[in-house]
Amino acid sequence: MNDESLDRLAGALQNGDADSFKSLVELLTRRLIAMAYRYTQDWESARDITQDTWLKVFENIDRYNPRKPFRNWLLVIHRNGCISSLRKRARRIDAPLGDGPVLRAADAGPGPSELMERKQFGEHVRRAITKLSKKQQLVLTIVDIEQTDQEEAARSLGMKPVTLRTTLHHARRRLAGMLRKE
């Protein structure tokens, strides 16, 4: 669905049309869940974050500026929820070791030690991302985690493409340096 149609639905929601909210949820939920999954690597967490996003949208629809694209406003709310989820995870130091997937002998997947290494590396990356500047976190997550095209990311953030690329370069370099130290 194009942005103009989404903007019309958001405008109708601001005017009290509950059916427009249902339409927005139906149209955009799958994309939001997929985006949250790229952050969390957990479908249940992704669904929870998405549900929280829709709740925030419904509660704060009066703050939406109809002169700006609804999709961008929604994605900022959702991205903030995803980043908050990562921060909460990074603060949890004493997570139980046995919360990964259970593998049977017939599974051809990685062994327990490899799964643990992947999980630990993921935690290192999440923790390191929270140490980047807010702008670097935003650009890195949009381009590298959400896998948004750089031109589209620059447009949605209101940045020049060259500024986005420079910020992304510095964020990646700083992240790599932090990960090498660990």
Image (cartoon, rainbow, N blue to C red):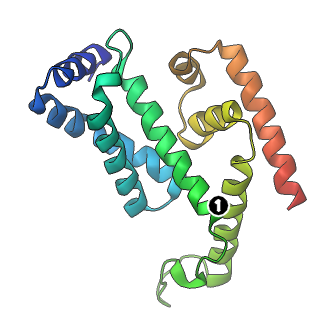
Query: Observer-nearest residue: 106 or 164?
Result: 164
- SS at mark 1? helix
Query: Observer-nearest residue: 135 or 181?
Result: 135
Mark 1 sits on what residue? 90
- Quadrant housing the N terminus: top left
Considering every residue shown, the one lying at the far bottom of the view is 105
- Near mark 1 (Cα within 10 A), the count class, few <14, some 14-19 or many ≥20, is some
Query: Observer-nearest residue: 39 or 62?
Result: 62
Q: Amino acid under label 1?
A: Ala
The location of residue 19, given as percent across then percent down, is: 10, 32
For the image, the number of numbered tags is 1
Considering every residue shown, the one lying at the far right of the view is 181
The location of residue 148, given as percent across then percent down, is: 53, 32
Position above or below: 9 against 103: above
Q: Is residue 80 left or right of residue 134?
A: left
Q: Residue at x 55, y 24 (%)?
A: 153
Q: Is residue 118 left or right of residue 44?
A: right
- Quadrant housing the C terminus: bottom right
Position above or below: 159 against 118: above
The location of residue 172, given as percent across then percent down, is: 77, 39
The location of residue 121, given as percent across then percent down, is: 71, 64
Q: Residue at x 58, y 62 (%)?
A: 89
Q: Is residue 85 left or right of residue 16?
A: right
Q: Residue at x 36, y 56 (%)?
A: 48
